[in-house]
Image: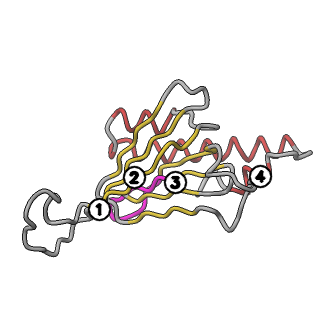
Amino acid sequence: MRYFTRELWSGAQGTDDGDDNNRLWNLAFKEYREQLEALRSRLDNDAFEFFSSADIHDGELLNVQIVDGSRPAPISEPARPWGISNQYPVRVEVSILDAYDKLVWDLTYSGLRRVVIDYPSADPLFYFSGEGFGDLGYHELTDAGQNYLRHEVLFATGATLLFEF
């Protein structure tokens, strides 16, 4: 995470320096919004709306499904010859429930070149033994270079999801 870091989030918890912490959060939000606006032309309107205004804070990860699309044919059909492709055949589907149990966001990432799931994190935040991923904290969409985008999600436990698509 480039803008909404673990350090920024943990610094907001129980700090005596509220003014400095507010300044840091405001700066992070401002810088994130500016770079997100620069990505607008690379997203359709619905995707941009999600990344710019969806309130996932305290939401819940319902599922993550990783689909490897490199198989040469569906299981029910005879296999076609294997071939080498420069395409990235992996797809990820994610469902997130909002904090009020009223709205589910279904996200699909295609053409993935990188998937990272850090659970359980070696660098925990607000983790309780036996907990899953925990509440969603923050997410950000950034440029990953070579015409790819990166979506990262930070959970209260310190676990993270990262998808470059």
Q: Are marks 1 and 2 in contact (CB under 8 Å)?
A: no
Colour scheme:
secondary structure
3 or 1: tag closer to the N-terminus: 1
The stretch drawn in magenta includes residue 147:
yes
| Element type at mark 1 | strand
152 shown above or below 44: below
Kind of residue at badge 3: Glu
**Is residue 143 toward the left or the right of residue 87 in the image?**
right
Q: Magenta residues, as a range?
A: 142-152
Kind of residue at badge 4: Ser
For disc 4, the marked residue is 10
2 or 4: tag closer to the N-terminus: 4
Kind of residue at badge 2: Gln
Q: Main secondary structure of the magenta part?
A: strand
4 or 1: tag closer to the N-terminus: 4
Q: Are marks 2 and 3 in contact (CB under 8 Å)?
A: no
Residue at horizontal 69%, vertical 56%?
A: 6
Q: Are marks 4 and 3 in contact (CB under 8 Å)?
A: no
For disc 3, the marked residue is 152
For disc 2, the marked residue is 65
Q: Residues within 10 Å of mark 4 (few under 14, many from 20)?
A: few
| Label 3 – label 1 distance at C-alpha | 20 Å
| Element type at mark 2 | strand
Residue at horizontal 73%, vertical 52%?
A: 8
**Camera-nearest label, 4 or 1:** 1
Q: Residues within 10 Å of mark 3 (few under 14, many from 20)?
A: many
Q: Residues within 10 Å of mark 2 (few under 14, many from 20)?
A: few
